[in-house]
Amino acid sequence: MLIPIKHENMAARRWPVVTLALIAINTVVFLFTTMSMHDEAPQLGEVKSDILILAAVHPELKMHPEEERLVEGFKKSHPDQWKQVQSPYRDVINAYDAKIKLMEDPDKLQEEMDSLNEQYVKLSSTSITEQYAFIPSHPSALSYLTANFLHGGWMHLIGNMWFLWLAGFVLEDVWGRWLYSAFYLIAGAAALQFHAWLNPGSITPTLGASGAVAALMGAFLVRFPKMKIEMAWIWWFSMLRLLRTGNPFRLWRFKASAYWLLPLWLGVEILYGTLFGSISSVAHWAHVGGFVFGALAAVAIRYSGIEQKANKAIEEELAWTNDAELEQASSMMEHGQLPDAQALLSSYVASNPNSLDAWALLRQIYTRQSDTKSYLDATVKTCALHLKAHQIEAAFQDYAEFIDNGGGKMPATTWLELCKGAEEMQEFERAFAEYQELAKAYPAERQSLTAQLSAARVCLKKLNRPKDALAIYQAAAASPVPHLDWETLIQAGIKEAKAALASPNAKAARAQ
């Protein structure tokens, strides 16, 4: 079983109040409806079953509109089962089926059909699933909204809410609360409609937030394709392990980029939807429809300029909120009250650590005070914040100022993100050089090995220098940093580099 744990960007500029509100609403609705849904299901299901059996055995009986809709929906979505129920040679299904087969009086049979319709109408009018879940054969306008807030069990709810949190809060941060709210509600309706198109006539109630959540996943893929998602792979290992350790499960954690992990999930949903279709208890086509809608909507939002406008509004709101203290600090600086301004800003960044404006002012104060150490520390902070905001050029400007002012070496984590930023800008020579410098600066740290492997990869894949790549891979293999978990990757790199060196193109290049 694969479970996402977290991703690289687990922080936001503001509280994700919409995402938290959606989780709260879903949870409250579940707590207030789960017992009723559980209690109503057996009786309603029994009445539906009796109507279908009676209609199949005695098609000559007159049905009411509610019964006709139920029967026609079952015929369309389960044609093979309907033929089987109609067959006079089949086995007896249940006690009611046996009872009906013994009834021969047409009037009594019609009375039975009328009685079943009365029960069905009465139970349906008070049923949460019949009134508020999405039924493809006869969806109500309200159910396009309400079905997204109903869940069939604790695991159904927890799974959807966890995925909602992981994908939702970062999209809320970049889109803003109103755009994000509208997207979520429209996406949920679109996913249900897609499910109805692929399952016309289905009488099975569809409920849950998974269609809307799948849309968030599709949008996440478009907006953050290179984001690394940390996954947990849990599986039953063996009875021997249970006896030896008391735990029969094993856990393996790994990271994967969104651009291949999420399409893989979509492919699995398409496969399951194709193979199992209407017989599955999971609305796979709602997941597919939601994912596709979310991806397309995210593309439209991004390239229409709506996202940029929403993001600008967020920045202006944050700036307006913070203006008073920052303006006070700026005024103090203008009047030469540097210690007071420094004290105010230091207090400010303690509660607002991600404020680029505050850190920029602090850098100015440290420069005027000739406090080089504090200036360099603040520059490292602004560099990290620029990287977090995907402002890579600004981050490299911070890096240049850090070096020009005597900074020895960047913190390994920030430096590593800078290198990745250079790759993202397609500046592979720059990325390679920085990876190499990072590896030399932190020879005993885990980031050193990460930098070596990244440098080798860039050298081999982007710069076409297999000889240099081989040397780096071999150096990584001999690294004193523990790397048993990466040994397979290192050996595969060595093998690939040697194969590239042995290729005719590589030989021709060396001959020139």
Image (cartoon, rainbow, N blue to C red):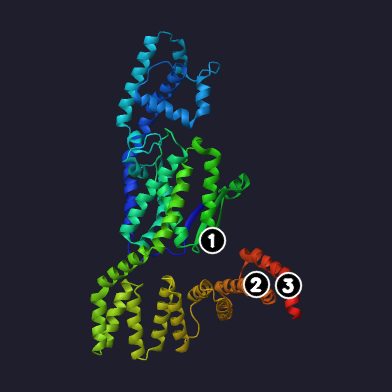
Q: At numbered mark 1, what does the secondary structure look like: helix, strand or loop?
A: strand
**Residue position marked by numbered label 1 in the rendering:** 255
Q: Label 2, label 3: how many angstroms apart (C-alpha)?
A: 14 Å
Question: Which of disc 3 and disc 2 is earlier in sequence?
Answer: 2
Q: Residues within 10 Å of mark 2 (few under 14, many from 20)?
A: many
Disc number for residue 505:
3
Q: Which mark is residue 239?
A: none
Label 2 amino acid? Answer: Leu
Residue extending farthest to the front is 304
Identify residue type, mark 3: Asn
* Residue 453 image offset from top left, x and y in percent: 61, 71
Sooner in the amino-acid sequence: mark 2 or mark 1: 1
Q: Which residue is mark 2?
A: 460
Q: Is residue 88 visible?
A: yes
Q: For this rendering, which residue is in front, 122 or 294?
A: 294
Q: Residue type at mark 1?
A: Lys
How much space separates mark 2 and mark 1, taking CA atoms? 22 Å
- Would you say residue 45 is visible in this rendering? no
Instruction: Say which of marks 2 and 1 sits in front.
Output: 2
What is the distance, in whole Å, between disc 3 and disc 1 at their CAs? 34 Å
In the image: residue 98, left or right of residue 112: right
Could you tell me residue 175's position as x and y percent? 36, 62
**Would you say the residues marked 2 and 1 are in contact, meaning their CB atoms lie under 8 Å apart?**
no
Q: Position of residue 76 (x, y in %)?
A: 47, 30
Image quarter of the C terminus: bottom right
Q: Is residue 42 above or below residue 247?
A: above
Residue 299 place in picture, x, y as percent? 43, 60
In the image, 13 versus 138, the foreground residue is: 138
**Kind of element beneath mark 2:** helix
Marks 2 & 3, CB-CB < 8 Å contact: no
Q: Is residue 293 left or right of residue 443?
A: left
